Image (cartoon, rainbow, N blue to C red):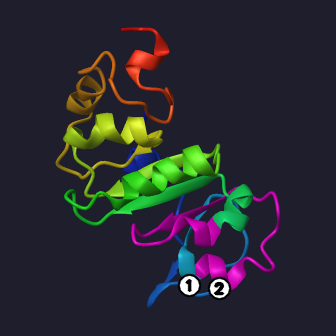
Amino acid sequence: MKFIDNHNQQWHHVVGEDGPMPCPDPAPYILLSLEQWHAVRGHWPVGLVTAVELNNDLEIEDLVTDLPRFTMIALKFPKWTDGRAYSQAKLLRSRYRFAGEIRATGEVLVDMLPLLARTGFDAVHMRADQSKAAAERALGFFKGHYQGDVDAKQPLFARGEA
């Protein structure tokens, strides 16, 4: 799993004096809000390295036709107790076969890392008070899981590994 460092971040938001620019000019490595994406998608160059940041209450189905245009999708966890972004990531990977980066942002804690990895996230931007070393250890806590996940679809008994 890739850990995002604020100091070496290539993706950036486009903001003006009053917040997000409503209709930003096309450029690579822009992390667009959903509102910005809807405003520019008609004239946004196909093939431009682009990402969108989604709230966890969005129905992924509403964005399916646009998925091939994104290099990265950032899914927000507004609270660590609100896990709807896990479901969004699983849908992106399993049902819609999204191959780009899926990044967890917001209130991301070390304890969440194993489930983030199992549901399809491959990058995290953890809350500032969280330790990267502890997060890396957390990813190695479990050697295997009984249930299936985005990588191993079948449960353990059906994989012949029991």
| Extent of the magenta region | 36-63
Residue 59 part of the magenta-drawn span: yes
Residue highlighted by disc 2: 23
Identity of the residue drawn at 32% across and 24% down: 146
x then y, percent, for residue 75: 44, 59
Identity of the residue drawn at 36% across and 30% down: 147
Quadrant position of residue 38 = bottom right
Seen in the picture, residue 2 relative to 5 is either above or below; the reply is above
Report if the CB atoms under discs 1 and 2 are less than 8 Å apart.
yes
Along the line of sight, which residue is nearer the eye, 144 or 68? 144
The numbered mark at residue 140 is: none
Q: Residues within 10 Å of mark 2 (few under 14, many from 20)?
A: some
x then y, percent, for residue 91: 52, 52
Disc 2 residue type? Cys
- Assign a secondary structure to mark 2: loop
Point out the residue furthest to the front here.
158
Seen in the picture, residue 95 relative to 140 is either above or below; the reply is below
x then y, percent, for residue 82: 25, 62
Seen in the picture, residue 158 relative to 127 is either above or below; the reply is above
Does residue 16 appear anywhere in the picture?
yes
Disc 1 residue type? Met
Quadrant position of residue 61 = bottom right
